[in-house]
Amino acid sequence: MSGRSFRWPCDGAALLVSVRAAFEARDALAGGAAIIDVKEPRSGSLGAPARRVLEAVVGTVAGRVPVTCALGELGETSDAVIDRLTRVRGVALVKIGLAGRRGGDWDQELLYLRARLRSRPHAPDLVAVAYADAQVARAPSIGDVVALAVRERFPALLVDTFVKDGKTLFDAVSLDDLASLVRSAQQAGVRVVLAGSLTVDRVDDIVALGADAIAVRGAVTTGARDAAICRRRVEAFVAALREETRATPGPTRSPSARPRAG
């Protein structure tokens, strides 16, 4: 499955679980994950996995849900690594970060990479990535990345945090700004995935924002971010998303509509 034939797995917020091994993919699938993402968290926010790991995960998933893959950071991951990973059949979408690319020709480089992928049959399509902590990451602003994603009709936009220090996406961007971002992208046909140390206790805000998918790892492991995926924690996150979606009137609501407990 390539990004050009990617079918979103469900209505409402799908749970994307990032894994670093085939056995983790099995546990994530068993827990109800709708999308399996492959990355190496020890190599950064969007650390690229080894090709053998990606191939093993794709084989384990066996087409049951879409598979996506991280490619590291633009300009840091070599063309050879990108080529090896994007030639693995069965990967729907790939993503590459923009840390350190503020002020350069990042947009043209990103479009060039996307054109390379789209010129090959069965190759995955490229997701646009915006870092919420863009100043720390020395990355282009969220607004600039959203504008590019909308203008060039990227299949999806990932909003994530570059630094994994316990702070969340909601610490970096207000709920109102996120809601505006989601609306702008979706109105242009761009799917939105939210990430950034999101936890199950914020499911009400996550669902209220109307994102197409929520990407998690640390929230569903047995401990630290690089610990193993825990099936029960995946199940709990999926159940919470479904319950909140059923309880939410209409497709979206204002993120500030529900008062939060102090």
Image: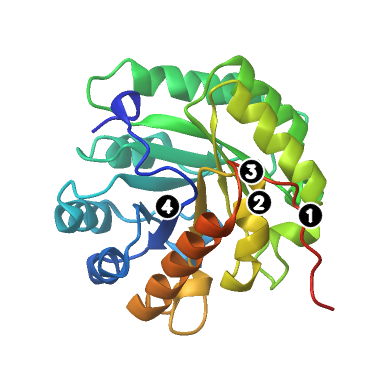
State whether residue 213 appears in this view: yes
Q: Which residue is mark 2?
A: 208
| Amino acid tagged 4 | Ala
- For the residues marked 3 and 2, what is the alpha-carbon distance in whole angstroms? 5 Å
| Amino acid tagged 2 | Ala
- Residue pictured at 36% horizontal, 19% vertical: 118
Task: Find residue 172 and report its horizontal and vertical position in percent.
Answer: 79, 56
Q: Which residue is mark 3?
A: 252
Give the quarter of the figure containing the N terminus. Answer: top left
SS of the residue under disc 3: loop
- For the residues marked 4 and 2, what is the alpha-carbon distance in whole angstroms? 31 Å
SS of the residue under disc 4: loop
Mark 1 vs mark 2: which is more N-terminal?
2
| Amino acid tagged 3 | Thr
Mark 3 vs mark 4: which is more N-terminal?
4
| Amino acid tagged 1 | Ala
Labelled pair 3, 4 in contact (Cβ < 8 Å):
no
- For the residues marked 3 and 4, what is the alpha-carbon distance in whole angstroms? 34 Å
- Residue pictured at 80% horizontal, 42% vertical: 177
For residue 186, which quarter of the picture? top right
Mark 1 vs mark 3: which is more N-terminal?
3
- The label on residue 257 is 1
Labelled pair 3, 2 in contact (Cβ < 8 Å):
yes
Task: Find residue 7 and report its horizontal and vertical position in percent.
Answer: 33, 33
Is 45 displayed left or right of 56 in the figure?
right
Q: Nearer the viewer, residue 81 or 53?
A: 53
Numbered disc in front, either 4 or 1:
1
Labelled pair 1, 2 in contact (Cβ < 8 Å):
yes
SS of the residue under disc 2: helix
- For the residues marked 1 and 2, what is the alpha-carbon distance in whole angstroms? 9 Å
